[in-house]
Image (tube, rainbow, N blue to C red):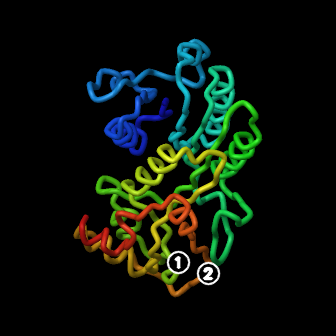
Amino acid sequence: MLIIGSGWLGLPLAKSLINQGHQVTATTTSREKISNKILPIIHLNTDDDASLASINDSFDVMIITIAPQRKNPEHYLEQLQTLHQLAIRKKFRKVLFTSSTSVWGNNEGIVNEMTTMMPVSESAKAMVSFEAMARDASEYKATIIKLAGLISGERHPGRFLAGKTAVDNPQAPVNLVAKEDVIGLISQIINQQQWQQSFIACAPSHPSRYEFYTQAAQQLNLTPPAFSSNNQPSKHIDGQATARHLNYQYKFPDLLTWLSLH
């Protein structure tokens, strides 16, 4: 299989899948990463026809883990469209796309796989466009997994809001997921051959923003955020149907417990 992107998620995912016995190659836009001795990494520039042509047609599965760039979100849709064409041209049979729960935009209340997507940001709109493109493709089978906010030791949520003032929505539920659980869920999808499906990766616990981000900042000895009293309706991402379908038990179901360990 070919993992598009060898960054914060793609590289540890590749290592995990290799440890499970899969043959994995990852792509990078940084030539410095190619010399690593852990797994095969190849250079891929989606803006370069020669680079795209260099991908051989021996791969069966494409896993897209690249994230949009804040400075150029419009380019993200172009990248995804290029990868769609690459999957067709190189005869991939399956595509797994790591989308985001941001596709639900300003939805309120309980949100699950059946909730209508209401993207607001350009990157979320790009994801929705690609999801439709991939689902409609007859050349390959696509599965989408929408990721909640991603956290890890190196991406610690204590830094997200530390020192900020007048932060709104103190009582809103947080919708986050640990990197280990994203990798675990994707592994289940691959190992169980769960194609033409739509899934959610989000921890089952949803402490309030006030409780979670206060403790998160304190865990790093940073100044906790100061919240306002302004509370707006918010969304609660429910990924329990995904966990049941994949028979997956979260390694970090409780986000406050995750904080105590990091």
Q: Within 10 Å of the Cα at label 2, are there few (<14), some (14-19), or many (20+) other Cα atoms?
A: few
What residue sits 61% from the left and 35% below the top?
94
Judged by depth in the image, the label closer to the viewer, 2 or 1, is 2
Q: Amino acid at mark 2?
A: Gln
What residue sits 77% from the left and 41% below the top?
136
Task: Tell me: residue 162, above or below residue 120.
Answer: below
Task: Tell me: residue 79, above or below residue 193.
Answer: above
**With 179 as the anchor, is 142 left or right in this view?**
right
Residue 117 image offset from top left, x and y in percent: 72, 60
**With 152 as the anchor, is 147 left or right in this view?**
right
What residue sits 36% from the left and 66% below the top?
252
The residue nearer to you, when weighing 236 against 199, is: 199
> Which residue is the site of mark 1?
168
Q: Give the CA distance from mark 2 to mark 1.
A: 8 Å
Residue 40 image offset from top left, x and y in percent: 37, 24
Q: Quadrant of residue 231?
A: bottom right
Label 2 vs 1, first from the N-terminus: 1
> Which residue is the site of mark 2?
232
